[in-house]
Image (cartoon, rainbow, N blue to C red):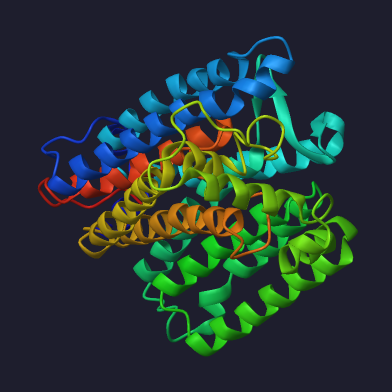
Amino acid sequence: MAESTIQRPGVAAVVRALLPQRGARWTSEAIALTTVVGALTVIGLVMSFSASFVDAAETGDPFGVFLRQLLWAGVGVPVFLIAANLDHGVWRRLSWLLMAGALGGLVAVLTGLGITEGGSTRWLALGPLVVQPSEITKLATVLWLADVFTRKRAQGIDPSTDPRHAFLPAVPLLVVLSVLVMAQPDLGTTLLLGLIVGLVLLVEGAPLRHMGTLFVAGGTFALVAAVAAPYRFARIAGWLDPEADPLGNGYQLLQSMYALGSGGWFGLGLGSSRGKWNFVPNPETDFIFAIIGEELGVVGAVLVLTLFAAIVVLGLRVARTARDPFGRTVAFVVTGWITGQALVNVAAVTGLLPITGVTLPLVSVGGSSLVSTLLALGILVAIARARARPHRKVPR
């Protein structure tokens, strides 16, 4: 009877989980994470205005892009603070609803309701807001899989000794999500979803030999997808030898490198980028790190990288000391997802990886990305704070 009560809590237990954490204090990790997130958000707002000013002015409103991003920050910051003050166990209850909403959004995008831009159909209009369901899908995947594996372990199932339970339902979910996202098409987000599922399997102890097989299968899929689409193949050709076609396939990378190289140690000065004057493509989104390097120099670029490195250190510390399996998995995967995405973006901007269209979390312009990332980091802060409250079972 007692076990049944734990598995199916009453309404009162769920309501308690929705209330701010009682007895929890702001630990050093929680304070440091909040500071780092605040710094990256402020840098993102400043650089979004600087990087978008020229392109936005050509549309008649030089402040347009910045004001939209500021509006999204006005949504995302309260979301972060609310999530940081809630019992993180509530996200186990909401994970199924979030996953259902994410899947519904991905399907809706492909059924004539989506907004097409730049050859991709990735967005939905919800009144005055335009959202990107694939961004919410990343967080939904983390929370839903963390809940599933927590339930498995509560039933005495150890994924590290039973490959079937390690890869079900994670791999089928990844296949479904990949099909829906690739139909938009969006290879970058598909690869990030693969990273998220891989991190979940890693922290849950999936057998490494099976993980290797999954990695090879994922790499093969990415290679085939890149070769099959002419524009993706052109990106790879431009990455391998950008100077062979400086005005075509190699243009984006070369302009990014020129912008980074002209910044020197201390940059040309905030707002003084030459690359954003219709040279660097997508200066406020995919290539905002190039504008940071040009305007703020090596010092500014290293500062941004240091802040992401701080998220790695703090996030892994929170994961290691989490008080429950769900919190441990979420903390580890959120840390790996956000910093991994940042690494992919910076690597593409600097020519270490082909251009994938992956944005820089918290910094690049993008409302759905900003809000979902702030929500994920707010949950991470809540897990850090949970260590400081008296131990009690998290509602299942």
Q: Is residue 87 visible?
A: no
Residue 387 image offset from top left, x and y in percent? 16, 51
Position above or below: 385 against 164: above
Above/below status of 24 relative to 58: below
Occupied quadrant, residue 150: bottom left
Image label count: 0
Which of the 4 image quadrants contains residue 326? bottom left
Position of residue 40 relative to residue 178, above or below, is above
Instruction: Note whether 297 is above or below 82 in the view shown.
Output: below
Does residue 319 appear left or right of residue 247 in this picture?
A: left
Residue at (43% x, 86% y) in the render: 161
Viewer-nearest residue: 72 or 331: 72
Question: Is residue 210 at all visible to an observer of this figure?
Answer: yes
Drawn side of residue 138 relative to residue 243, left or right: left
Quadrant for the N terminus, please.
Answer: bottom left
Asked whether 227 or 2 is in front, the reply is: 227
State the image coordinates of residue 237 (x, y, percent, origin top left).
Answer: 80, 66
Query: Where is residue 152 drawn, in percent x and y?
Result: 43, 68
Residue 261 locus on image (x, y percent): 54, 50
**Who's the residue at 20% across and 36% down the image?**
21
Q: Nearer the viewer, residue 337 or 88?
A: 337
Farthest residue toward the top?
60
| Residue drawn 53% across the image and 45% down it | 262
